Image (cartoon, rainbow, N blue to C red):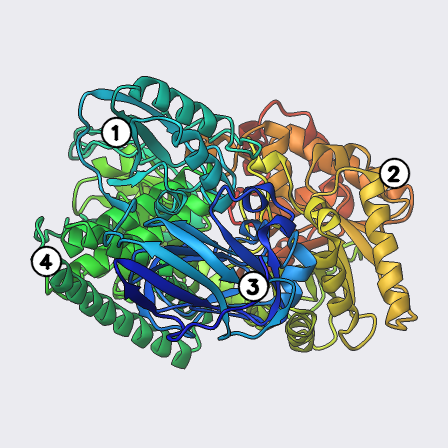
Amino acid sequence: MGGSMVGNDPGKGTVTGGVTRLSLLAPLDGWAAPLEEVPDPVFAQRMMGDGLAIDPTGGTLRAPCDGVVIAIHRARHAVTLRAECGVEILMHIGLETVALGGRGFTVHTTEGAAVRAGDALIEFDMDLLAREAKSLVTPLVIAGGPSATVVAAKTGVAVRAGEVLLTLLVQGRGSARADGAGVARGSAAGAERSLVLPLAHGLHARPAAVLAAAAKPFAAAVHLVAQGRRANAKSAVAAMSLGLRHGDALTVVGEGADATAAVAAVADAIAAGLGETPVPPPAALPVPSLPSAAVPPPDEPPALEVQPPFAPGETAVIRAVTAAPGLALGRAFRLEDEEVEVPASGRGAEAERTLLAAALKRVRARLGAAVAQSEAAGQAQRRDIFRAHLAILDDPELLDEALAAISGGEAAGVAWRAATDRRATALRALGNPRMAERAADLIDLRRQVMLALAGREPQPVILPQGAILVAEELMPSQLSNLDAGRLAGFCTARGGPTSHVAILAASMGVPALVAGGAAVLRIPDDAPLILDADRGLLHVQPPAEDLARLERETGQRQARTEANLRAAAADCVMADGTRIEVYTNVGKVADAVKGVAKGAEGCGLLRTEFLFLDRQTAPDEDEQAAQYQAVATALAGRPLIIRTLDVGGDKPLPYLPLPREENPILGLRGVRIGLRRPEILRTQLRAILRVRPVGQCRIMVPMVATLDEVRAVRDMLDQEREALGHAPPVQLGVMVETPAAAVTADQLATEADFLSIGTNDLTQYVLAMDRGNPDLAARLDALHPAVLRLIRQTAEGAARHGRWVGVCGALASDPAAAPLLVGLGVTELSATPPAIPDIKAALRPLDKAACAALAREALAQESAAAVRSLLARAGMAVSVMEGAA
C-alpha cells in the first residue's frame, strides 16, 4: 500500500449508496509502515485485521476518527474505538507492552466515552518503552464491525498526528455492539466447557487474535462467558473487552451443528496458551462451571465454625498473633458487622451510574477529611492508610468493572459489591498473606460505599470504658472511628499482623491480637478478659485471683517502664563492662525520631520498602537519597544500617512484574530480585552512597543464601562507589534469614563486614511454618532450640573473622530474650522503639558469663516451651512478639 488520499471530511464517514467512506487520521507522529513489517506474526499476518503501523516519534495516541471507546486493556497499552459506521479500530502501543502492567501509560478516556477525531486517548513514556518493550511499533488495525476495504493508505513516509492516514470503504452499518460483550444469556442446545485462563498477562491482543482464528472456521456460534458477561469468541476485540486475567474462570459455549468440535478446539487452544507459554493457575483455584449465585467464590475465606459461647465462669486461653504489643485488662465488647441492604434491581443504567458516582463522592470526601485530620495530628501511618483507601477508590479498573455491570442492567449496589468482592477474592487467591490482608481494605470500602448508597452515614460505636473489642474481623474505618480513650485493646478471629488495622493499632498504642480463630466468636459480651499481646494470649473469664495479680503487675510494670525510660539515653553496658549496642528498627523518618527519644544508639534496620510499596512507579534515585538523608539527619550522626529492597514473596510490587510462583516465600525474594533487576539495586546503592556525612550509612543485603550473592552485590557497590568518586569503603553486611546463611556464616563472613539475624524469616524456614498462617501462629516460636542453635552457629562463624553479629528480627524486641541472645554471642540488638528502655534495663545488671550459662542450658532443651519454662525459672518471663521485620 502506498501513496495518499485526502478525504473531504477527515475523521468522519461520508455515505454514498449504502457505502461509507471513512478517513482515519494518524493517531501519532511517526513513520508509517505496512503491517508486513511489524515484527509480530499476529499483526504481520493480519490475524487481527487489515491496517498499518506507525513507528512513533511522539508519545500521545489520539483518536483517528469520531467514535466511542469500546475497550481499554487493563494494562493501558491498547484501546479500541467503534466509528459511527460500526467499524472497530484497534490501536496497540508497542509490542509485548502488556508485560509492563500499565507502567508508562496514562489513559485520558474511559470505556463508553464518545471521542472526537484528534482527542488524546493515551500518553506513554517512550523512553521506558524503548528500554523494556520489544518494539515501539504501534499497529492500527480494523479489528471488527461491518466489512471494510482499505482503498488508500500512507506507508513508507513520515506522518504527523491528524493527517489522513487510511481510507476505508465500509459496506452497510454495524450494530451498536457488533460482536461485543454483553450480559450472559442461556445457551441453546450445544456444548460448553469450563476452564481458567492460563495466560500470565491476561487475554490481550495477540492471544485474542489466536482465539478468534481458532473459532472462525466453525459454523457454530462460539462465545466466552465470564463474570456474568458474554463475548463472541470470533471477535478478538469482543474477547479482549471481557478483561480476563490470569486465573480467571471462563466457559466456552457453542451453539450450532458443529458446536462440540468448535468448543473443543477453542478450549484446547486456550488451555495451550493461545500462542504463549501457559502458566498454571494457583492450585487453590478449582476449575469452575458457569457462574452461579449458589456457588461461593472459590477463594472466599472459609466460614468459621459456629460454636456455643463460653459458659459463665468457664475459663479459656486463646492463642493468637500479636498485631500490636501490650497488656490490657477489661471486658469484652462484641462488634457485629452489619450487612448493608441495597436495592437488588436497578432503575436504569443512567440513574444507577449517578447513584454510584454520588456515593463514591461522599466516601471520597470522608476519606479526604480523615487524611487532613491525620496530617494535622502528625499521624503519618493513619494518613497513609486513608490515602491508600483513596487510591483504591479511584482505581479505574475497579470503577470500570462496576460501571460495566451497571450497563448490563445491575443495580449500583449489586455492581459495586460484585466488583469489590471479585477483587478481594483475587487478592486472597494469590496465596500471599500481605495481599490477603489488603483484601480487607476492599471489603472496608465496599461497606462504606454501600452505606452511602443506602443513604446512611457510618455510626460511631459507643464503647464502655476499658472495652476489649472482639470481632470476626475489624476494618480500618471501624477502628479509626472508635474512642481510643475507652478502647483497652482488641482481638479478632481473622486478620494478619501486617494489615492496616494492625498498623493503626500500633500507631494508636492499642494492644491487639489477630487470627485468634473461631474461639474468639465464643466470647460473650461483658466477659472479663486479660489481653496479653506480648505473649499472644487472650485469657477469657480468668479467675479473680489472676485478675487481681495482673492488676498489681500492671501497676508495677508502669513504674518500671517510667524508670527504664529515664535511664534509656545512656549506653548499654553490662555489669562486667560488656558493651551491647541497642539500635532501633525504622520504617520511615518518624520511627527514627521515636527510636532516638527511647534511647536508640543507631538504626539497625531501615526497611526501605516504605519507599517502594503502595505506588505505581519505582522511586528514582533523587527521591530515595532524600528519604535516606532525612533518616540519617534524624539520627543525628548515629549509625544507620539500610537494608536494600526486600520484596517478592509477601511483598509484591505492581511495577515489578514477577512470574507466578508455586511458593513465593521460597522464590524471587530479597537479593534475588536485586540481582535479577540490577538497575533497581544499583539505583538504591547510588542513593545510599549520597547520604552525608560519609560513613554514617552501612548497607545490608536481605535473604542471602550463598557467598556468590554477597560477592555480586559487593562488585556492584564498588563499581557505583568508584563512579560517584566515593573514596571511603562502605560496610556491607548480610541478613541471616535462611538456614543456609546460618550454617555457612563462617564463609559469608569472609566477604561481609557484619551479619544481622532476621529471626522472623529464619524461624519460618527452620520450622517449615509459614509465618502468615494463623493456624501455625501458636507453634511459630523463635525460641525453638533449632533456631537458637543456628543463632549460635552464626555468631561462632562470624567470630572466626572478627565480624559482629546483631539481631533485627522480632526476638530482638523482647527484653526477656536479650540475655539469652547475648549468651549466644550477639552484640547488637535492633528493636522497636518502645522496647529499647526495657532491653537496656534487662542487660545492665548481668554479666556475660551468666548469659552464656543460660544459653548453654537453653540449647539443651527439647522445645520452645521448655526454653520459656527455663527462662521463667530464672526470673525472665518471655514474651515472643510476632511483629513484621
How packed is label 3: few (under 14 Cα within 10 Å), some, or many (20 or more)?
many
Q: Nearer the viewer, mark 1 or mark 2?
A: 1
Q: Nearer the viewer, residue 203 or 398?
A: 203
Residue 542 visible within the image: yes
The residue under the point 47% across, 31% down is 281
Q: Which residue is mark 1?
A: 290
Q: Tag 2's secondary structure?
A: helix
Does the residue at mark 4 contact the one at mark 2 (Cβ under 8 Å)? no
Name the spot of residue 164 as percent of width and height, x first.
48, 71
Q: Are marks 1 and 3 in contact (CB under 8 Å)?
A: no
Q: Residue furthest bottom?
A: 376
Which numbered tag is attached to residue 348?
4
Dot 1 surroundings within 10 Å: few (below 14), some, or many (20 or more)?
A: many
User: Which tag, 1 or 3, sits closer to the chain's start?
Assistant: 3
The crowding category of the residue bearing disc 4, from other C-alpha atoms within 10 Å (few below 14, some 14 to 19, many at least 20), is some
Q: Callout 1: helix, strand or loop?
A: loop
Q: In the rendered image of this protein, does residue 712 appear above or below residue 445? A: above
Q: Which mark is nearer the camera, 2 or 3?
A: 3
Measured in 3D between alpha carbons, the distance from the residue under mark 1 to the one under mark 4, in whole angstroms, is: 26 Å
Numbered badge on residue 104: 3
Q: CA distance from mark 1 to mark 3?
A: 36 Å
Quick check: 547 above or below 312?
Answer: below
Q: Position of residue 24 (x, y in %)?
A: 44, 66
Q: Alpha carbon of mark 1 to alpha carbon of mark 2: how far?
A: 57 Å
Between the C-alphas of marks 2 and 3, the distance is 43 Å
Residue 250, horizontal then vertical, whole percent? 34, 33
> Which residue was labeled with disc 2?
747
